[in-house]
C-alpha cells in the first residue's frame, strides 16, 4: 500500500515540478558582459484589438534600444480583454506580480492608483513637455505630477447623422430651444430624433459628465470642489435632467433591449438622427455601413449657448509601475511612445487623436469638426467626478430612465455615492 | 388510454425539445452570417454561408493550440479529482468517528464561497508555488477546487456498496489499497462517470480562473481565446458565434460517442 | 495468515462492543484505521488545503479589514463590515430577497421539470438517446456564452417573432423591465441547468427495480400512485443530491445575471453574488467589505443546506 501511495504522490510531485519548470519565469537576467544588457519588460495593455499595432511599434522600440543603448529588450505583451483588464491588473498588483508598464484610464484610474502608490513620477521625462496643453492635465495628478503618457483622447458630445441633417437643412442646435426645434422638424419628417440604447449601463451614464461639465464651465464652477469637501449636492447641477428627459421622450423604442452593438448598427442604418455617444464607436459604426458619415457636436444642456460645449477627455494611458525593477528601460519605452519621428505613424495606425506637436497626421473627418470647437475654446476638460460616483450614476440613471426612480432619488443617490467616496478615501 | 398518454408525453417532449434546441439553432445559423446581417434580422437564414467566419476564427485565435491547452487542463484536473476524490471519499465513508466527520465537513466547508472572494489569495499562493502561468499548474489548481464535490458524491455512493465485499477481500489477504483498486474503484464506475461528465463541462468552459492564471496568449484555453473576440466597443459576433460552436463541439461529440457507454455504466452500477 | 484475517474481520464487526478483544489490540486497530484514513485522504487534502481552504481563510481574513484590493496598506475594522452589511446596505438586503425568490423558483422548477423529463424519457424506447442529448446539450455550453446568446434572443429574436400574430405574447420587455427580467433570468438558468439534474435523475430511475413497480400495478395502483409511493422513495438519494446542487447553485448565481441584465435596470435584478462582485470591483472597490458580505452569503447557504440535508436524510432512512 505504501509503495502504491508513494508512487501516486511522486507522480503528482513530478507534475508539479513540470509545472514549475514550464511556468513563466519572470526574473530578468542581467548579464554584465561587454556584449549587451538583457532586460525583460512586462507590458499590460487592455486593448487586444490593437495587438498588431502594439507589437509592431514595440519591435521598433527593441531595435532602437539595441542600437542606441546596446540593451536587449524582451517585451512580454499582455493584452487582456478590456472588460476584465481592470480586475486582472488589480489582482496582479495585489499579488506582487506587477507589470512594468500598464494601461489605465486617465480620468478614472489615476487618482486611485496614485494614492495606492503604484505610479512612477514621469514629470521630468522628455515626453511630458511634448504634450498638448489640452491633454496634459488629464495625466497629471492633483499634486502636479505627470504619471502617464496619454494614448486615447476623446472629443465628444453626441453623434449626428450628416446625411439626415443636410437633407433637411438642419443646423447644429446651440441651445435647448434650438434642439427642441430640431426634434420637431425631424418628427415632421417621420425620423426618430434620438437613438436610445440603455442596455449598456455606461451609455445613460454619459449624461453625467455632459451635464456636470457644462454647468461647471458656466454657472457652478466650484461644484466639484464643494462635493469633495462634502458641502455640495447634485441639486446644484440644475441641468442634470433637462436634456436627458428630452432625449428620452423622443427616441427609439425598446431602449433597454439595445446596447452599443445593436446601436452602432442601427445608427449606421439611419434608424435615428442623433445618438448621445462618442467617436469611440467609429469603428463599430463604420463597419456596419462603410459609407456612413457622422459628425460630433456639443450637447446643449440649457438655453445658454455658452454652456453648449464639447467634452475633452483622455482615457487609455500608459504608466510605469513604481514596483518595476526595470524603470530605466520602461521609461525609455514610454518616451518612445511620443518619439519625434515614429510616434505620428503609430498614433495614426491606432486611430487615436493627436496628443502632441509630434503628431502630424490628418485627423479623422469628424475630428476636424470637433477640433474647430476646441480651438474656439468651446470645450472643457472632463470633470473630475470620482469613478465611484460615475459607477453609481450608471445604476441611478438606468433606474430613472426605466421609471423606477425619481429625480429626488437620483440626486440623493449621487450625493450619497460622493459621500461614500469621500469617506473611503480619507 | 395508455396510447393517449404516450402520444401526449411525446408531444410535450417534442415541444420542450424544440424550445431547448432553439437558442443553439439560432447561434448556429447566425454564425454563418455577416455582422450586418445578424443585426438586421436574426431569424432569417443566411443568404450566403460565410464559412470564412469559421476559418477566420481558427486563424485569428490559433484555436488548435487553445484546444490542446484546454484538453491538457481538463485531463490533469479530471485525473486528479477522480483519483484523490475517490480515495478520500471511500475512506471517509468507511471510517466512522469524529476525525472522519471532521475531515469530511472540512472538505465541504469551502464549497459555498464565491470565487471572487478567494481569487486574490489564490493568486498569491499560485504565484508563490510557481504554478501560476502554466497549463499544468492550472490543472493542479482545479484538483484543489473540484475534489471536495467529488468526495461528497463518492462518499454518498460508497454507502450503497455492501461492506461484505471488502471484508471478504480482507480475509483473502488484501491490504487497504488493494481492496480499493481491485474491488471498490471498479464499482464506483457509475459515480465516476457522473463526476466525469459534470466536471468536464466545468473545466472545459471555465473562464475566470484561467484568465487570472494564464498570462501568455500561447497558454490560453478555448474560452479565453474566444473571449478575445469581445471588443470594447465592437464585438465580432459572427466570429464569436462560430467560436462558440467550435468550442462546444468537442464536448458534444465526446458525449454523443460515449453516452451509451457512460450511461450503461451508470445503469449497471445502479442495478447492483 | 487466514487465521489473522478472520480475527481482524471479527474485530471489524465487533468494533462497537469490544467484548472479546483486548484493549491494546483495539487501539492498534484504531491507530491503523486512522493512519489508513489519513493516507487515503492526504492527496485530496493537500490540493484542497493549498488551493481552496487557505484562500477561503484569506477571504475571511480580509473581511475584517477595509482593504480595497489595490492599496499596499489596510486597517483592521473588526466586525464593522458585517454590521454595516446588515444595517446600512439596502441594496444588499434587496439582493438577498431577490436571490431568495430566485432560489425558491429554481428549486421547485428545476427539480420538478428535470424529474418529469427524466420520467418521460425513460418511457421512450427508440428516441431515448435523442431526447437525452437534446436536453443535456444546453448544459454543455458555457454559461456566460449561453446567457449572451439569450441576450440576443430576448433583444432581437423574440421581438421579431412577436410581430407574427400567434407569438404576440412574446412582445415583452424581456430585459428592460424588472418584473419580466426575473423570468428571463429564470428561463436561461432553467434552460442551462435542467439537463444536469435530468442526467442524475435518469441514472437513479434506472435503478428502480421494475418488480416493485409491477407489484404495485398488480395491487391496483395507478401511475400517479406508483410514482409517489414506489418511484420517488427509491430515488430519494438522487433527490437529496439534486436538491443540494440546485440550492447551492441558485444562491450563488452570477454568470447568467451578469451577462443578461448586469443586475439592471438599475439594481432591480441584482443577485447577491453580483452585489458582492460590484462592491469589490467597482464603485469604491471595497474588497474587504465585499468579502464580509461573501461570508454572510456563505453562512446563509450553509444553514439552508444543512437544514435541507437533514430533512431529506430523514426521508432517505425511512425509504
Image (tube, coloured by chain):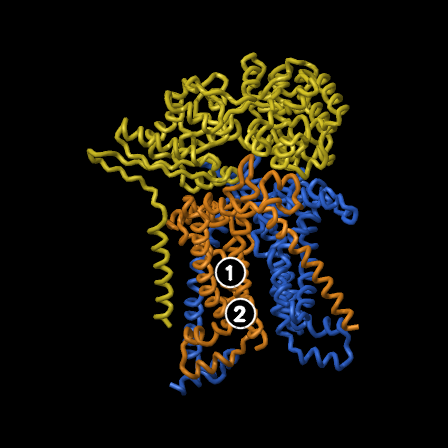
Is residue A87 or residue B235 the one in the foreground?
B235
Q: Which chain is orange?
A: B
Which colour is chain C painted? blue
Which colour is chain A painted? yellow
Disc 2: host chain? B
> What residue is pinned by disc 1?
B148
- Mark 1 Cα shell of 10 Å, populated few (<14), some (14-19), many (≥20): many
The picture places residue B2, in percent across and down from the top left corner, at 77, 73
Does residue A347 sit above or below C86 in this rendering?
Answer: above
> Which callout, 1 or 2, points at the residue further toward the start of the chain?
1
Residue B261 - label? 2
Q: Residue at x 50, y 58 (%)?
A: B146
Give SS at disc 1.
helix
Give the Cα distance between marks 1 and 2: 26 Å
Outermost residue toward the top in this view? A376
The picture places residue B71, in percent across and down from the top left corner, at 45, 56
Does residue B146 sit above or below A371 in this rendering?
Answer: below
The picture places residue C106, in percent across and down from the top left corner, at 67, 55
| Dot 1 and dot 2 residues touching (CB under 8 Å) | no
Does residue B261 sit above or below C253 in this rendering?
Answer: below
Q: Where is the N terminus of chain C found, in terms of image quarters? A: bottom left
Amino acid at each position: 500500500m505504501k509503495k502504491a501511495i508513494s508512487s501516486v504522490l511522486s507522480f503528482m510531485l513530478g507534475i508539479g515540478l513540470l509545472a514549475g519548470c514550464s511556468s513563466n519565469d519572470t526574473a530578468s537576467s542581467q548579464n554584465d558582459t561587454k556584449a549587451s544588457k538583457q532586460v525583460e519588460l512586462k507590458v499590460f495593455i487592455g486593448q487586444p484589438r490593437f495587438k498588431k499595432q502594439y507589437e509592431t511599434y514595440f519591435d521598433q522600440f527593441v531595435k532602437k534600444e539595441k542600437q542606441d543603448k546596446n540593451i536587449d529588450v524582451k517585451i512580454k505583451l499582455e493584452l487582456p480583454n478590456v472588460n476584465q483588464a481592470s480586475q486582472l491588473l488589480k489582482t496582479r498588483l495585489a499579488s506582487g506580480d506587477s507589470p512594468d508598464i500598464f494601461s489605465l484610464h486617465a480620468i478614472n484610474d489615476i487618482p486611485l492608483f496614485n494614492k495606492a502608490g503604484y505610479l512612477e513620477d514621469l514629470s521630468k521625462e522628455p515626453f511630458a513637455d511634448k504634450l498638448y496643453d489640452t491633454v496634459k492635465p488629464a495625466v497629471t495628478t492633483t499634486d502636479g505630477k505627470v504619471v502617464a503618457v496619454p494614448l486615447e483622447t476623446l472629443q465628444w458630445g453626441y453623434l449626428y447623422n450628416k446625411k439626415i441633417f443636410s437633407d433637411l437643412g438642419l443646423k447644429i442646435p446651440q441651445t435647448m430651444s434650438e434642439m427642441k426645434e430640431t426634434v420637431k422638424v425631424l418628427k415632421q419628417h417621420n425620423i426618430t430624433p434620438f437613438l436610445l440604447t440603455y442596455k449598456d449601463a455606461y451609455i445613460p451614464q454619459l449624461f453625467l459628465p455632459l451635464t456636470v461639465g457644462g454647468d461647471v464651465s458656466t454657472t457652478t464652477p466650484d461644484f466639484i470642489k464643494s462635493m469633495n469637501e462634502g458641502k455640495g449636492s447634485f441639486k446644484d447641477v440644475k441641468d442634470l435632467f433637462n436634456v436627458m428627459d428630452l432625449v428620452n421622450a423622443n427616441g427609439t423604442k425598446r431602449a433597454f433591449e439595445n446596447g452599443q452593438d445593436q446601436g452602432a448598427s442601427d445608427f449606421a442604418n439611419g434608424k435615428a438622427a442623433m445618438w448621445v455617444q462618442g467617436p469611440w464607436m467609429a469603428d463599430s459604426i463604420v463597419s456596419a455601413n462603410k459609407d456612413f458619415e457622422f459628425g460630433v457636436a456639443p450637447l446643449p444642456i440649457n438655453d445658454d449657448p455658452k454652456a453648449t460645449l464639447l467634452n475633452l477627455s483622455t482615457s487609455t494611458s500608459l504608466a510605469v509601475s513604481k514596483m518595476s525593477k526595470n524603470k530605466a528601460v520602461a521609461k525609455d519605452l514610454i518616451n518612445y511612445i511620443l518619439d519625434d519621428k515614429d510616434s505620428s505613424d503609430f498614433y495614426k495606425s491606432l486611430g487615436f487623436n493627436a496628443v502632441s506637436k509630434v503628431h502630424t497626421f490628418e485627423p479623422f473627418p469628424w475630428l476636424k469638426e470637433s477640433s474647430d470647437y476646441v480651438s474656439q475654446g468651446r470645450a472643457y476638460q472632463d470633470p473630475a467626478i470620482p469613478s465611484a460616483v460615475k459607477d453609481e450614476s450608471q445604476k441611478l440613471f438606468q433606474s430613472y430612465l426605466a421609471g423606477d426612480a425619481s429625480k429626488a432619488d437620483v440626486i440623493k443617490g449621487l450625493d450619497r455615492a460622493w459621500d461614500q467616496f469621500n469617506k473611503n478615501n480619507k | 388510454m395508455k396510447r393517449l398518454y404516450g402520444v401526449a408525453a411525446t408531444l410535450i417532449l417534442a415541444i420542450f425539445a424544440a424550445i431547448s434546441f432553439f437558442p443553439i439553432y439560432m447561434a448556429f445559423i447566425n454564425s454563418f452570417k455577416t455582422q450586418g446581417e445578424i443585426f438586421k434580422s436574426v431569424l432569417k437564414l443566411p443568404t450566403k454561408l460565410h464559412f470564412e467566419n469559421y476559418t477566420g476564427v481558427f486563424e485569428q485565435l490559433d484555436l488548435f493550440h487553445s484546444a490542446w491547452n484546454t484538453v491538457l487542463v481538463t485531463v490533469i484536473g479530471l485525473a486528479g479529482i477522480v483519483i484523490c476524490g475517490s480515495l478520500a471519499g471511500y475512506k471517509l465513508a468507511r471510517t466512522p468517528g469524529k476525525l472522519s466527520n471532521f475531515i469530511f465537513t472540512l472538505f465541504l466547508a469551502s464549497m459555498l464561497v464565491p470565487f471572487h472572494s478567494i481569487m486574490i489569495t489564490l493568486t498569491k499562493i499560485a504565484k508563490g508555488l510557481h504554478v501560476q502561468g502554466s497549463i499544468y499548474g492550472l490543472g493542479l489548481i482545479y484538483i484543489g477546487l473540484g475534489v471536495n464535490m467529488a468526495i461528497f458524491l463518492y462518499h454518498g455512493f460508497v454507502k450503497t456498496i455492501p461492506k461484505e465485499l471488502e471484508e471478504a477481500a480482507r480475509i483473502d489477504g488484501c491490504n487497504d489499497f488493494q481492496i480499493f483498486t481491485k474491488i471498490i474503484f471498479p464499482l464506483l464506475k457509475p459515480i465516476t462517470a457522473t463526476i466525469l461528465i459534470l466536471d468536464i463541462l466545468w473545466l472545459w468552459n471555465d473562464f475566470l480562473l484561467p484568465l487570472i492564471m494564464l498570462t501568455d496568449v500561447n497558454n490560453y484555453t478555448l474560452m479565453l481565446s474566444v473571449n478575445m473576440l469581445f471588443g470594447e466597443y465592437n464585438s465580432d459576433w459572427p466570429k464569436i458565434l462560430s467560436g462558440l460552436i467550435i468550442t462546444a463541439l468537442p464536448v458534444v461529440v465526446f458525449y454523443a460517442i460515449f453516452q451509451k457507454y457512460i450511461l450503461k455504466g451508470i445503469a449497471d452500477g445502479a442495478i447492483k | 495468515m487466514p487465521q489473522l484475517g478472520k480475527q481482524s474481520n471479527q474485530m471489524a464487526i465487533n468494533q462497537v462492543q469490544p467484548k472479546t478483544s483486548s484493549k491494546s489490540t483495539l487501539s492498534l486497530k484504531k491507530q491503523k484505521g486512522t493512519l489508513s484514513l489519513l493516507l487515503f485522504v492526504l492527496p485530496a487534502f493537500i490540493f484542497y488545503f493549498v488551493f481552496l481552504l487557505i484562500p477561503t481563510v484569506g477571504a475571511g481574513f480580509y473581511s475584517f479589514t477595509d482593504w480595497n484590493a489595490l492599496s499596499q496598506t489596510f486597517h483592521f475594522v473588526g466586525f464593522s463590515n458585517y454590521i454595516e452589511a446588515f444595517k446600512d446596505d439596502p441594496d444588499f438586503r434587496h439582493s438577498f430577497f431577490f436571490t431568495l425568490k430566485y432560489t425558491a423558483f429554481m428549486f421547485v422548477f428545476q427539480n420538478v421539470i428535470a424529474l418529469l423529463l427524466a420520467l418521460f424519457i425513460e418511457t421512450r424506447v427508440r428516441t431515448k438517446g435523442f431526447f437525452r442529448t437534446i436536453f443535456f446539450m444546453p448544459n454543455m455550453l458555457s454559461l456566460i456564452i449561453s446567457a449572451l446568446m439569450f441576450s440576443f434572443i430576448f433583444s432581437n429574436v423574440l421581438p421579431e417573432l412577436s410581430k407574427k400574430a400567434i407569438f404576440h405574447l412574446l412582445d415583452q420587455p424581456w430585459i428592460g423591465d424588472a418584473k419580466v427580467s426575473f423570468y428571463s433570468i429564470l428561463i436561461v438558468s432553467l434552460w442551462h441547468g435542467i439537463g444536469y439534474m435530468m442526467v442524475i435523475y435518469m441514472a437513479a430511475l434506472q435503478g428502480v427495480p421494475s418488480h416493485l413497480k409491477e407489484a404495485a400495478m398488480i395491487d391496483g395502483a395507478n401511475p400517479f400512485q406508483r410514482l409517489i409511493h414506489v418511484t420517488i422513495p427509491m430515488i430519494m438519494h438522487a433527490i437529496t443530491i439534486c436538491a443540494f446542487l440546485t440550492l447551492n447553485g441558485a444562491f450563488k448565481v452570477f454568470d447568467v445575471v451578469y451577462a443578461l441584465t448586469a443586475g439592471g435596470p438599475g439594481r432591480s435584478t441584482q443577485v447577491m453574488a453580483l452585489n458582492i462582485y460590484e462592491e469589490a470591483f467597482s464603485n469604491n472597490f471595497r474588497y474587504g467589505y465585499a468579502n464580509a458580505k461573501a461570508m454572510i452569503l456563505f453562512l446563509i447557504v450553509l444553514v439552508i443546506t444543512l437544514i435541507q440535508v437533514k430533512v431529506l436524510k430523514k426521508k432517505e432512512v425511512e425509504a
